């Protein structure tokens, strides 16, 4: 307790009142892909040379990456006669003490230094050394010089990477695998953040699937799909739009749903190798989660890598379009009935009619499969998840629940462990209600409110340090089934004669 007596003035800060609540970022994509020809890292290097011919030595970091830029090398004149050549390592610093003759003149040549550095275990663990020419030139003393130009591998295996420039990243993804095509598909739809996890392409499909699903290796590192769980701690962003374009069969999708539930994310998945609409409807029966939407068939379009028309992943375009809608309209708008960029066809013939439910598209939608149509461009058609719970039948119902839950929870870290006075509880409730009013005004929700339940918050509960705040909300339903009721009538003929006369 502060000292009671004071002759003067004190100011005591009382930081009460509501805190503004910021909606969590929703347009963050989590993508798992292969890229066998992705760009490699670049090893840092340093050339130390002198005017004398053949006196240069080039040092190259033992491992590629920016860590090599921290390595330093120096040549030291011992300042004494008949000194022996010696190499010492301290951390990332390599010190070469040069040899001298009986007159204290330096005698070490480039070749001798390169041999000595490569023979020293600690030094060779950091760099490899190569002399210039025959290495016969004698060197001079120098201060510390850094290796430079080391670059990290842009897509290290099983490691989340945050991309902000998708077009630039395509150049590093290489021409093989699924990564470059997926990035192109997303970039066609939106400019957004993408967390990429590259996995190794196996010798066969089964090995690739194993790599995609991943797990935890012997060091505790998460691999494959599981690596998406490490993104928030690395980058401060949580992937919420998830997919594995071209690699997502039932096994992969089932695993990805588990990751989505941990991240409060949403999965867009293809209907595997379904050949018909009936196959696609049966494929959808593999899943019952609210966090997944099944899409069938695929788009087609021009592939610049092969200079030919080929199937293009609908999942990749769904992910990009979802991010675009989040940014431009909001998470309360479903994927359905918005134009898709970068495609020129559909891989299967889909019969669709706006007014007739007895169509291919109608059949697929009735079985909770989102399909593709062409009307004013190419579009996704369908808003349903795989949930059997009507409360989360629509994509935007699930995403509304996820966004609200994370927004309310993450916004109240400040309140944890504060003294639980009634004023604190009131501030929390008022802050939540203010956020609900904002969402309602913006059209994200139809309604929502928070309150304190006295019956639930008994003295025993409060004494244990627990507090229950209740809130409810009503998401905005999509207008899935618009029905006009048309009637023919003769009542407008009743006053026909009067209107003729009046004319």
Image (tube, rainbow, N blue to C red):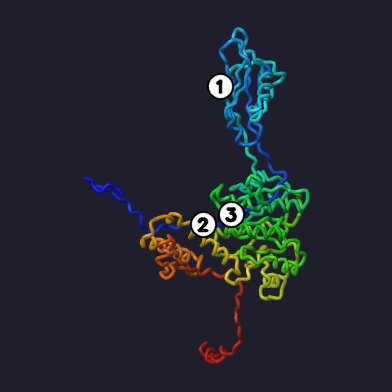
In-front residue for pair 333/87:
87
Q: Residue at x 60, y 79 (%)?
A: 484
Residue 445, position in %: x, y?
50, 67
Left or right of 354? Residue 501 is left
Q: CA distance from mark 2 to mark 1?
A: 50 Å
Left or right of 448? Residue 273 is right
- State which tag comes first along the sequence, 2 or 3: 2
Marks 2 and 1 close (CB-CB < 8 Å): no
Q: Which residue is mark 2?
A: 24
Q: Does residue 471 appear in this view?
A: yes
Q: Residues within 10 Å of mark 1 (few under 14, many from 20)?
A: few
Q: Residues within 10 Å of mark 2 (few under 14, many from 20)?
A: some
- State which tag comes first along the sequence, 1 or 3: 1
Residue 497, position in %: x, y?
55, 92
- State which tag comes first along the sequence, 2 or 1: 2
The secondary element bearing badge 1 is classed as: strand
Q: Does residue 341 appear in this view?
A: no
Q: CA distance from mark 1 to mark 3?
A: 47 Å
Residue 99, position in %: x, y?
62, 14
Tag count:
3
Q: Which mark is residue 481?
A: none
Q: Which mark is residue 143?
A: 1
Q: Which residue is mark 3?
A: 239
Q: Residues within 10 Å of mark 3 (few under 14, many from 20)?
A: many
30 up-or-down from 283: above or below: above
Q: Residue at x 58, y 50 (%)?
A: 231
In-front residue for pair 359/428:
428
In-front residue for pair 241/234:
234
Residue 246, position in %: x, y?
71, 56
154 up-or-down from 121: above or below: below
């Amino acid at each position: 307790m502060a000292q009671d007596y004071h002759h003067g003035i004190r100011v005591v800060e009382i930081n009460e009142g509501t805190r503004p609540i910021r909606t969590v970022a929703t347009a963050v994509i989590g993508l798992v892909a292969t890229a066998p020809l992705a760009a490699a890292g670049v090893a840092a290097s340093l050339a130390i040379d002198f005017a004398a011919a053949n006196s240069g030595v080039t040092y190259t970091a033992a491992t590629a990456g920016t860590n090599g830029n921290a390595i330093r090398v120096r040549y030291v004149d011992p300042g004494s006669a008949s000194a022996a050549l010696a190499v010492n390592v301290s951390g990332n610093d390599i010190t070469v003490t040069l040899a001298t003759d009986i007159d204290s003149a330096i005698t070490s040549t480039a070749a001798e230094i390169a041999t000595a550095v490569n023979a020293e275990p600690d030094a060779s663990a950091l760099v490899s050394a190569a002399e210039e020419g025959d290495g016969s030139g004698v060197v001079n003393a120098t201060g510390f010089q850094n290796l430079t130009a080391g670059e990290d591998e842009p897509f290290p295996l099983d490691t989340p990477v945050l991309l902000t420039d998708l077009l630039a990243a395509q150049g590093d993804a290489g021409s093989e695998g699924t990564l470059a095509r997926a990035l192109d598909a997303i970039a066609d739809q939106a400019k957004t953040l993408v967390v990429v996890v590259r996995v190794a392409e196996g010798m066969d499909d089964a090995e690739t699937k194993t790599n995609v699903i991943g797990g935890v290796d012997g060091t505790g590192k998460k691999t494959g799909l599981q690596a998406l769980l490490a993104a928030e701690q690395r980058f401060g962003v949580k992937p919420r739009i998830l997919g594995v374009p071209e690699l997502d069969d039932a096994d992969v999708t089932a695993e990805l749903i588990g990751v989505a539930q941990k991240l409060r994310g949403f999965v867009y998945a293809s209907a595997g190798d379904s050949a018909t609409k009936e196959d696609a409807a049966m494929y959808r029966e593999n899943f019952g989660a609210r966090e997944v939407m099944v899409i069938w068939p695929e788009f087609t379009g021009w592939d610049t890598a092969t200079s030919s028309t080929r199937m293009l992943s609908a999942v990749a375009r769904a992910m990009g379009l979802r991010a675009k809608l989040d940014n431009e309209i909001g998470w309360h708008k479903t994927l359905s009935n918005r134009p898709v960029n970068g495609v020129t066809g559909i891989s299967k013939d889909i019969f669709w009619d706006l007014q007739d439910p007895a169509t291919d598209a109608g059949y697929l939608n009735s079985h909770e499969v989102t399909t593709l149509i062409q009307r004013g461009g190419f579009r996704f058609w369908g808003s349903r998840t795989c949930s059997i719970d009507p409360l989360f039948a629509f994509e935007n119902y699930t995403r509304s629940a996820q966004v609200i839950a994370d927004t309310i929870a993450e916004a109240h870290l400040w309140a944890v462990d504060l003294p639980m006075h009634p004023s604190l509880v009131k501030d929390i409730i008022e802050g939540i209600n203010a956020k609900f009013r904002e969402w309602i005004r913006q059209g994200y929700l139809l309604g929502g409110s928070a309150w304190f339940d006295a019956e639930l918050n008994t003295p025993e509960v409060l004494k244990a340090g627990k507090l229950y705040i209740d809130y409810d909300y009503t998401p905005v339903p999509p207008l899935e089934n618009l029905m006009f009721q048309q009637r023919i009538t003769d009542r407008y003929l009743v006053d026909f004669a009067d209107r003729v006369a009046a004319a």
